[in-house]
Amino acid sequence: MSKPIPQLPWIELRLWRQFVTVAEELHFGRAALRLHMTQPPLTQAIAQLERSLGVMLFARTKRSVQLTPQGLALLPQAQALLQQAKAVVLDARALAGGESGRLRLAFVSTVGFSILPPWVMAFRQEFPGVQLDLVEATGDVQLQLLQADEVDAGFILHASGFAVPGLQRLTVAQEPLVLALPESHPLAQRKTLRLADVWAQPLVSFPRRIVPSLYDAIFGMYHDAGQLPVVAQEAIQMQTIVNLVSAGLGVAWVPASVQQFQRSGVVYRQVQGAGRGAERIPVPGCETSLVWQRSSPSLQRFMGFANVHNAVHADSPPN
């Protein structure tokens, strides 16, 4: 039968601080001044510590105070303990202030063509204590991740002026839609196009579930003109859509930032709206917003960063 392990005495951090101060001063009076206390309680505290440890820490005479070998051996450990306790406090304050911790950000592929790379670099330099986890996901998947608390916030693409119900948002980019065409397409020879030129062109598009608001805006433009869009192929990722355009399957409406994806065999053209005045049919625009459900210190810090670096405007509807 094993012997029970004796219970070790609990030593308050205050006693270790007092021990270290006396050890550094080697004078109870000066140590008491540093600790903002009188000398008798300090003398009693050191005596209590020695009783708890079962060792003498100081050799005292009327003229001097010296560390015993045991006190000298314990001093580095006590100093390290105080430093660790200080670090815990600093870490807690950094977590509360969003200067450390973990931030899980989801993003759509179009953000990777524009703001995401420079923002990640700048944010990591400004807040190296924050672990930044990036998850590429389409808008519909991001909403599921937010609901399951698997990400803290997400960059989503949507039609201009659209707000996801129940989510707070910070709009960080606004851009027009442009038309991606095969380089060999006859319309690719023109610098700008009109809507009348493209109504009959087969489309490569994303499924409605991916970006419902933008899908509805694009197809609503066709319906407003009495046109029926012909979808040749659907794909989820913008890179795939552009690759399919390059293969000649059709044309595609894409955010202007996608032009940075320089796929051989593809050109991008601006398209002018149709009609005039009240009958005018404009080409819809799109926005990228940072959306979230529940805030956190690190997310608050990132939103402040975003406001400084390029944010268009904030819009925080109630949950």
Image: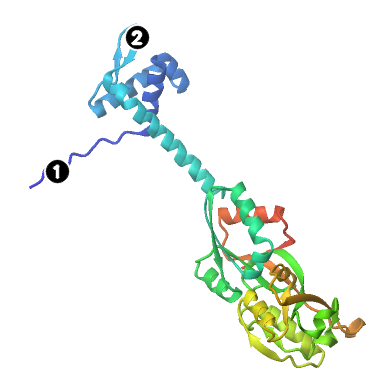
Relative placement, left or right, of 264 versus 69 is: right
Q: Name which quarter of the figure residue 232 lies in.
A: bottom right
Q: Nearer the viewer, residue 31 or 81?
A: 81
Relative placement, left or right, of 165 versus 276 is: left
Q: How is the image coloured?
A: rainbow
* Rendered residue at 30%/12% (across/down): 60
- Of the residues shown, which amino acid type is indicated by label 2? Ser
SS at mark 2? loop
Q: Which label is found at residue 4?
A: 1
Residue 281 image offset from top left, x and y in percent: 84, 83
Q: Which label is found at residue 148?
A: none
Q: Is residue 287 above or below residue 44?
A: below
- Farthest top residue in view: 63
Q: Can I make out residue 10 in this image?
A: yes
Relative placement, left or right, of 137 versus 211 is: left
Disc 1 crowd rating (10 Å Cα; few below 14, some 14-19, many 20+) is few
What residue did someone put label 2 on?
64
Disc 2 crowd rating (10 Å Cα; few below 14, some 14-19, many 20+) is few
Residue 245 image offset from top left, x and y in percent: 69, 81
Q: Can I make out residue 15 in this image?
A: no
* Rendered residue at 68%/69% (across/down): 261
Q: Nearer the viewer, residue 58 or 306?
A: 306
Residue 255 image offset from top left, x and y in percent: 72, 73
- Please tell me how many numbered marks the rendered image carries: 2
Mark found first going from the N terminus, 2 or 1: 1
Q: Determine the CA span between mark 2 and mark 1.
A: 42 Å
